[in-house]
Amino acid sequence: MSENIYVIGNWKMNKHLNEVTDFCDKLNISLHDMFALDNSSNIEVGIAPAAIHLPQMSSASTFSLVAQNIAAEENGAYTGEISASMVAEYSRYVLVGHSERRMYFDETNEILVKKLMLAYKYNLIPIFCFGENLENREKGDYLYIIKQQLEKVIWPVFSSSDFLNQNLIIAYEPVWAIGTGKNASPEQISEVHDYVRDLLINNIENIKDSVPILYGGSCNSQNAKSILEQKNVNGLLIGGASLDVNHFTKIVQIAHGLY
Ligand code: PGA
């Protein structure tokens, strides 16, 4: 099982430079205070800012950086795009397959496979997001949908021996829980995380048993503890509640208190 617990903030298209600097300064101090006496901490704290803020943050933060996106092509005539190799100069992780990218930017499974391979080529650790929408949840076929999402992207990449034992993080983010204030219950989360853990173990030889499975969707300081206590939950991907440094720090403290 995963040794680390991840607390990752996804800022989406929010914050300007002055706010970014202020957040970094405050979070650096809080993390220093929290971990000063605890060198062995297994909590990995990360923030996914807008790409334009990655350079500034890489020199100003003591926590890890996560890119929100990379291009599906390696380089060349793709106006407005940012390549994996560019992002890798500043960031350790990259989100791939976030539902907002699938929904608003038409990212298909084929595109996500290309992004995953480019992430590996440039030593970025992908955080692959998956999750059902409200209709699938209500119809009751959500486990089937989740299996398809993983099979169509993770399986093709990991069936190649080129990707043997690559680092991978996955994040269950039910679309109906994102930005709605309606998080999935610990039981609902547990059902999916246990199912996905079994799927990975039973289907992909080249994948590490310890792939961390994060949960995302309306996480906050009120529900963080009960979600993190679930057996196969290895961390949180936090949108709205990561924008406020005090709120985000509180969630990191909760994770730190539990592990
Ligand atoms: P939320 O977003 O915490 O605002 O629901 C989560 C995400 O989209 O990663």
Image (cartoon, rainbow, N blue to C red):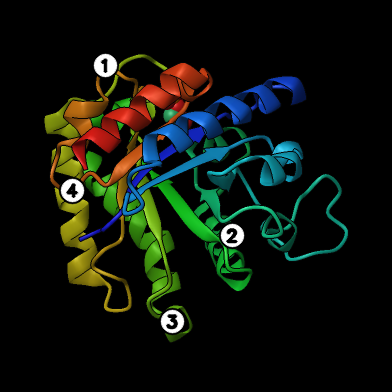
Residue 253: x and y in percent read: 32, 29
Element on which disc 4 rests: loop
Q: Nearer the viewer, residue 58 or 174?
A: 58
Q: Which residue is mark 1?
A: 222
Q: Quadrant of the N terminus?
A: bottom left
Please rate how many residues cluster around mark 1, counting C-alpha atoms within 10 Å: few if below 14, some from 14 to 19, many from 20: few
Split into quadrants, the picture shows ligand 1 in the one at: top left
Q: Amino acid at mark 3?
A: Ser
- For residue 53, what is the image quadrant? top right
Residue 175: x and y in percent read: 38, 30
Which badge, 3 or 2, comes first in the chain's sequence?
Answer: 2
Residue 64: x and y in percent read: 53, 47
Q: Is mark 4 within 8 Å of ligand 1?
A: no
Element on which disc 3 rests: loop
Q: Amino acid at mark 4?
A: Asn
Q: Nearer the viewer, residue 158 or 218?
A: 218
Q: Which is more foreground, mark 3 or mark 4?
A: 4
Q: Which residue is mark 3?
A: 160
C-alpha distance separating marks 3 and 2: 15 Å
Which badge, 2 or 1, comes first in the chain's sequence?
Answer: 2
Q: Amino acid at mark 1?
A: Gln
Please rate how many residues cluster around mark 2, counting C-alpha atoms within 10 Å: few if below 14, some from 14 to 19, many from 20: many
Which badge, 4 or 2, comes first in the chain's sequence?
Answer: 2
Q: Which residue is mark 2?
A: 115
Q: Residue at x 62, y 66 (%)?
A: 118
Residue 232: mark: 4
Please rate how many residues cluster around mark 4, counting C-alpha atoms within 10 Å: few if below 14, some from 14 to 19, many from 20: many
Q: Nearer the viewer, residue 240 or 177?
A: 240
Element on which disc 2 rests: helix
Horizontal side of 113 relative to 184 (left or right) equals right
